[in-house]
Image (cartoon, rainbow, N blue to C red):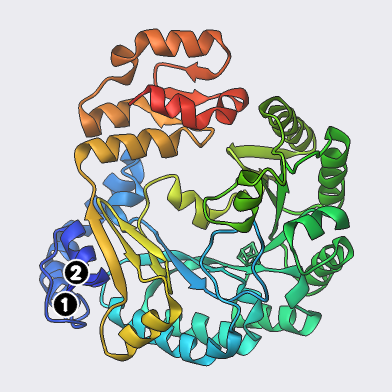
Amino acid sequence: MKFDHCDLFEIYCEASGLIPAPWGVQCFSEYPVRLRRGSLFFLVFGFWIFILVMTTGITRELTFPEPAGLYIHIPFCIRKCPYCNFYSVTDISLQSAFVKALHREMEFVSGSDLYFDTIYIGGGTPSILSAKYIDCIIKQAGQLFHFFTDVEVTVEVNPGTINAADLRDYRTAGVNRLNIGIQSFDDAFLEFFGRIHSGQDAFLTFKKARQQGFDNIGLDLIYGLPQQTPTQWRHDLQRAIALEPEHISCYMLTFETGTPMDRKKRQGLLTPLSEGRICELYDIAVQYLCAHGYEQYEISNFARTDKQRNYRSVHNSKYWSFAPYIGLGPSAHSFIHPLRSWNQQDINSYINTVQQGKPPLAGKERLNKRQQIIEMIYVKLRTVEGIDLNQFERKFGICLTGEFSTLIKRLEKQGKLICTPSRLALTPEGMLHHNSITLMFL
Ligand code: SF4
């Protein structure tokens, strides 16, 4: 697909109804004019507007822009894990060129007046990058984008790639949340996954992160390996909660098309776990984590909540709430309702395109009403909050409970769905069949 000067920034303008100005000068130059015109109005009516906002519950949406997320894809890994289909390369000699290209890409989109409250540095393996690069990326983002005062800054960490000094420097750079890709504490499973770290490395990485002052740490675990038993899975969960992380993600092993693990499966060299056993393992995770103080807020995600704080991932929650996000780096996706766009995947093309002064977009689409409905049902049913029925009807003019009353009653009877006058949500059992249930509504 070919783009002229149509890049993320114009996509942003199109989505928000702004008229795109010549590249890179939008919004910043308009603000002072808007403010001058507005100041007299606010002097006269400001007090009453303030009272109205405070007393009528007019929400943050009216007074502040919706917080957006900034995702940065670091496309390097020490070696490729056979189950993974995220884009990354093992040639890490391109690091410096990549970080320069990333900076250029940030400049391309910096004219938007989105306000961000998260930075998520994912991949790939971001922790391959030295702390000086992470520091540089965060600083550049801080200079080029608008941020709220409280920003969740997450870096994904692979236990085999980081030491205490790096972790300390991450903290200094402003990282306040880590997501550690542990996958399992069992060395035999880690070998099956092709990981470069051991269970002990994972344990030590977590401990070092705590020692360096990280008070918001998420762990990723994978279940559903061939021949995995409930006892083995319980053991992994026990070791995870013994560390008392703030967040745990439990991902079911999937055989993504084109991965070495999928090829093995097709060749009959490994037998996936039965559906019944997978359900059993999922059930164990939900019961076990909930019994130990973790709240399930999405199919695969569990967070601790205490009086002061809720440890749900602010960034990932944007994907389930249709909040705007911009993705930078090879293969990264962006979404500013109702427009979606995605970057070129190949790192060399990405760097070359950016060096030529062009945005590295590979494609974009405007979601039509039907696509928006499908996405809304699919995404919202992943969360424990589910679909807000009133909001859905206001947005699409469809009363879901009226249109699908028979289906909803059947799923409720099967214990897979909860339907209240205002909300439609899957039960933990229903979440396990999320894909097939979503299809029933289409
Ligand atoms: S699972 Fe993580 S470390 Fe392994 S190849 Fe994928 S991105 Fe790289």
Residue furthest out toward the front = 267
The residue under label 2 is 10
Q: Position of residue 213 (x, y in %)?
A: 76, 71
Residue contact at pointers 2 and 1, CB within 8 angstroms: yes
The residue under label 1 is 5
Query: Of callouts 2 and 1, which one flags the residue occurring earlier in the amino acid sequence?
Result: 1
Q: Nearer the viewer, mark 2 or mark 1?
A: 1
Q: Residues within 10 Å of mark 1 (few under 14, many from 20)?
A: few
Label 2 element class: helix
* Residue visible at 22% across and 58% down in the picture: 46
**Quarter occupied by the N terminus:** bottom left
* Residue visible at 82% across and 64% down in the picture: 202
The quarter holding residue 181 reads: bottom right
In-image side of 117 versus 215 (left or right):
left
Q: Is residue 393 above or below residue 177?
A: above
Q: Which amino acid, by three-letter code, is at mark 2?
A: Glu
Q: Closest to the observer: 47 or 85?
A: 85
Q: Which amino acid, by three-letter code, is at mark 1?
A: His
| Mark 2 → mark 1, Cα distance in angstroms | 8 Å
Q: Which mark is residue 416?
A: none
The quarter holding residue 89 reads: bottom right
Tell me which image quadrant ligand 1 sits in.
bottom right
